[in-house]
Image (cartoon, rainbow, N blue to C red):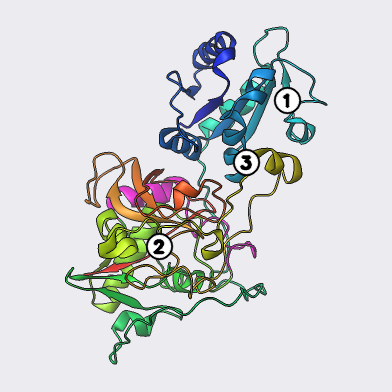
Amino acid sequence: MGYVFISYSTADQDYVYRLEAHLRSNDIDVWIDHQDMHGGQGLNKTIIEGIYNCHAFLFVVSTNSEASKWVPQEVAYAQSLDKPMFPLMLEGNPQTSEFALILAYLKYDDVRSGNMISDGTLARIRVVCGTSTGHGSNCAEVSPPEPLPVKPQPAAPPQAETPLRTVLMPSEKLMPAPFGWIEIPDKDYSIGKYPVTNAQFARFIEAGGYETQKWWPKVGWQHRKTNDWTAPRHWRDRNWNADEKPVVGISWYEAVAFCMWLSEVSGEVIMLPTEDQWKYAAQGEDNRTYPWGDQWDGSMCNNNVWNDIWVYLKTKPNDHGKGTTPVTAYENRNTSATGAIDMAGNVWEWCLTGGVDRTNQVDIEVTRRVLRGGSWNDTDLGLFRCDFRLGGDSVRGNRSNGFRLCRS
C-alpha cells in the first residue's frame, strides 16, 4: 500500500488534522509533517523523501499556504515527479489564487465550508495508493528504437584525461558503447564510467533476463512475478529509450539482476556500488561538494533547478524538466574527481546499500535502498551534492531512476 502526502500551512492545521483523521479512518495511509521540519533555504531531506516516495500528493490551498515559503516548493517538487495531485480549496478564489494555473487544469475539491473531501476524490486516492506504481510492460520488442536527435551542448573547458588500459575486460567487449571502467586507486574496485544505457540493458532482456530466475534475488523474483515486469517502465516510449540515454523505469531488483547476469556472462564480479563506493568515486580524496568542484553550476549537469518558485509555477506549471540526455552529453563538464561521468544529474543511481539499516546484502527484503546523484527533474540544488542520500522504494521504477556498475 502506498500513502498520500499532505502539503499544508501550519496555520491551517485544525482543518488538516481533521482531514488526516478522515483519511486514516478510510484506510488511507498518510504522510504529514506535524513538527514543522523545514529550515534553511531548501526543502528538508525528510520532506523530500516523503514526497519522492508518495503515491499521491494532496495540498491545501489557502491564503496561508500561498504565503508559505514551503508549500509552493513542495507542490513544484511533486509536479516535477509527476505525482497524482489532489488540490483542496480551503480558502480564497481559485481564479486569483497563486496556484490558479494549477487549479485550472487539475480537478480540485471545494472545502471552503470546512467539509471533508468528496467521496469521488477519496475513491481516487484509495485507488492510487492501493495500486503498485511499477506496472509491468507487455512490449514485444526489446531493442530500443533509433535515438532521437540531441541538442548540441556548448563547448566545455578541457579536463584531464583518464589513462586508457590497453587490454579490454570481457564486459567492455560485451557492452555497446559508451561503456568503460574507471579504476579507483588503492580501493580495489572500479566504477562504471557512465550510467547503464538502454542499449546495454537491452542485451540483458535479449538474453532472457526477465525469464531467468537465477539472476534475480529470491525476493526480487517474487516482485517481478507480482508486478509482471517484462521490461523497464517506459521501455517503448521514445522520450526515454534512445540507445545512449540512461535506462530508466527500473527497480533496485532489476538493476541487481542485470549485474548478476553480466557477472555470469563476463566472468567478472559486478554489482551495484555500495553508497560508500559511489560517494568516493564522486568526491575522491578532496571531498568536493559536487563531482566537478565545490560551487554549484547548473550548466555542468542535466537538472531542473529553478531560482524563483513563483516564476516556475506561473510560467511552466506542467513542465517536468528536459528529460534524460545521452550519458556522454556532459562528458567534458560533469566529470568526477576519479573520472566518472554523469554522477550528478540525469538520473538518480541505485546503490547496493539499504536506506535505513545500511545493509549491503542482496537476498533480503529491504523496503528502501539508497539513491544518489539527483536527476534531470530535480529542482533543489542540494539534491546534487555528493553527500546527499535518498531512500528510494526498492520496488519502484520511474523516469528518474537509473544505475551504474561497480566491479571488484
- The residue labelled by disc 1 is 108
Q: Where is residue 76 in the image (x, y as percent from the top left)?
A: 62, 39
Quadrant in the picture for the C terminus:
bottom left
Residue identifier under label 3: 79
* Main secondary structure found in the magenta portion: loop
Label 1 vs label 2, nearer the camera: 2
Label 2 sits on a secondary structure element that is loop
Residue at the image point whose x is 56% and y is 63% from the top: 299
Residue 244 shows up from this direction: yes
Which mark, residue 293?
A: 2
**How far apart in space, not on screen, are marks 3 and 2 (Cα)?**
29 Å
Task: Report if residue 272 is visible in the image.
Answer: no
Is residue 232 on the magenta stretch?
yes
Q: x%, y% of residue 196?
A: 43, 68
Query: How far, Cα to Cα, is label 3 from label 1?
Result: 15 Å
| Residue at screen point 58% across, 38% down | 78
Q: In this view, does 175 lie to the left or right of 188?
A: right
Contact flag, marks 3 and 1 (Cβ < 8 Å)? no
Q: Position of residue 252 (x, y in %)?
A: 38, 53
Residue 146's place in the image compared with 27, above or below, is below
Span shown in magenta: 217-241
Residue furthest out toward the front:
295
Looking at the rendered structure, the kind of residue marked 2 is: Gly
Instruction: Using a 10 Å C-alpha cutoff, classify the residue at mark 1 as few (fewer than 14 neighbours), some (14 to 19) or many (20 or more).
Output: many
Question: Crowding at label 3, few (<14), some or many (≥20) Cα neighbours within 10 Å?
Answer: many
Dot 2 alpha-carbon crowd within 10 angstroms: few under 14, some 14 to 19, many 20 or more: some
Residue 91 on the magenta segment: no
Viewer-closest of 78 and 335:
335
- Taking the image as shown, residue 269 lies to the left or right of residue 133, namely left
Picture quadrant where residue 9 is located? top right
